[in-house]
Image: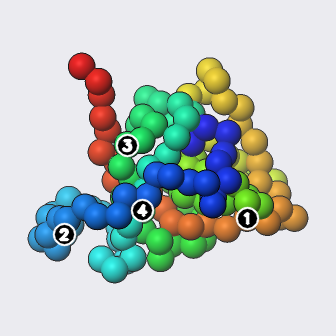
């Protein structure tokens, strides 16, 4: 989210959040293994209104390729991102923010140091009242 964050500086790792395997089976679609699930958070407003800075995101870390358009946790060089990735034949991967008023779309080219860290499967959206 935002303009990217140096991964070593990422303070948004949630160390513990306990849910049952039954809850995961009933509420999470498309994961490969329970052991590959983790929770991360993002910072910046680039994915609003889909989710807010600091919202917990359930990520399947066993997914390390972009097979279809979805929201991914990934890095380019040493910067981490949470964005929608869209495959564009002949161009590469288009990086799309939900908040298009403040964030431009850009393209990940083949010569960039790019790695998928996982695909976002579920988001717990928070709102201040």
Q: Are marks 4 and 1 in contact (CB under 8 Å)?
A: no
Question: Are the two marked residues, 3 and 2, in contact with CB atoms closer than 8 angstroms?
Answer: no
CA neighbours of label 4 inside 10 A, class few (<14), some (14 to 19), many (20+): many
- Left of 102 or right of it: where is 55? left
Residue 104: image quadrant is: top right
Q: CA distance from mark 1 to mark 3?
A: 24 Å
> Residue 118 location in percent, x, y?
51, 66
Secondary structure, mark 1, is strand
Q: Nearer the viewer, residue 85 or 21?
A: 21
Q: Which mark is residue 25?
A: 2
> What x and y, as percent, mark residue 17?
25, 61
- The x and y percentages for residue 4 are 66, 46
Disc 3 element: loop
Report crowding for label 2: few under 14, some 14 to 19, many 20 or more residues within 10 A (C-alpha): few
**Residue depicted at x 53% and y 31%:** 45
| Residue to which mark 3 is pinned | 55
Please state which of the two labelled residues, at mark 2 or mark 1, is closer to the viewer.
1
Instruction: From the image, tell me which residue sits under label 4.
Output: 59
Which numbered tag is attached to residue 114? Answer: 1
User: Horizontally, is 12 left or right of 64 in the view?
Assistant: left
Q: Secondary structure at mark 4?
A: strand
- Residue 7 is left or right of residue 15, and the answer is right
Image depth: mark 3 or mark 2 in front:
3
When the figure is inspected, residue 17 is found, relative to residue 124, above or below; the finding is: below
- Quarter holding the C terminus? top left
What is the spatial separation of the Cα atoms under label 4 and label 3, in whole angstroms?
A: 12 Å
Quadrant of res 115 = bottom right
């Amino acid at each position: 989210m935002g303009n990217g964050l140096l991964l070593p500086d990422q303070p948004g790792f949630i160390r513990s959040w306990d849910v049952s395997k039954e809850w995961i089976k009933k509420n999470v679609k498309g994961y490969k293994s329970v052991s590959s699930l983790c929770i991360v958070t993002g910072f910046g407003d680039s994915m609003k209104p889909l989710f807010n800075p600091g919202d917990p995101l359930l990520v399947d870390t066993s997914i390390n390729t972009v097979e279809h358009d979805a929201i991914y946790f990934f890095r380019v060089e040493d910067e981490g991102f949470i964005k929608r990735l869209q495959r564009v034949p002949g161009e590469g991967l288009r990086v799309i923010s939900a908040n298009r008023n403040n964030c431009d779309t850009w393209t990940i080219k083949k010569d960039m140091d790019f790695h998928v860290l996982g695909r976002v499967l579920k988001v717990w959206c928070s709102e201040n009242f």
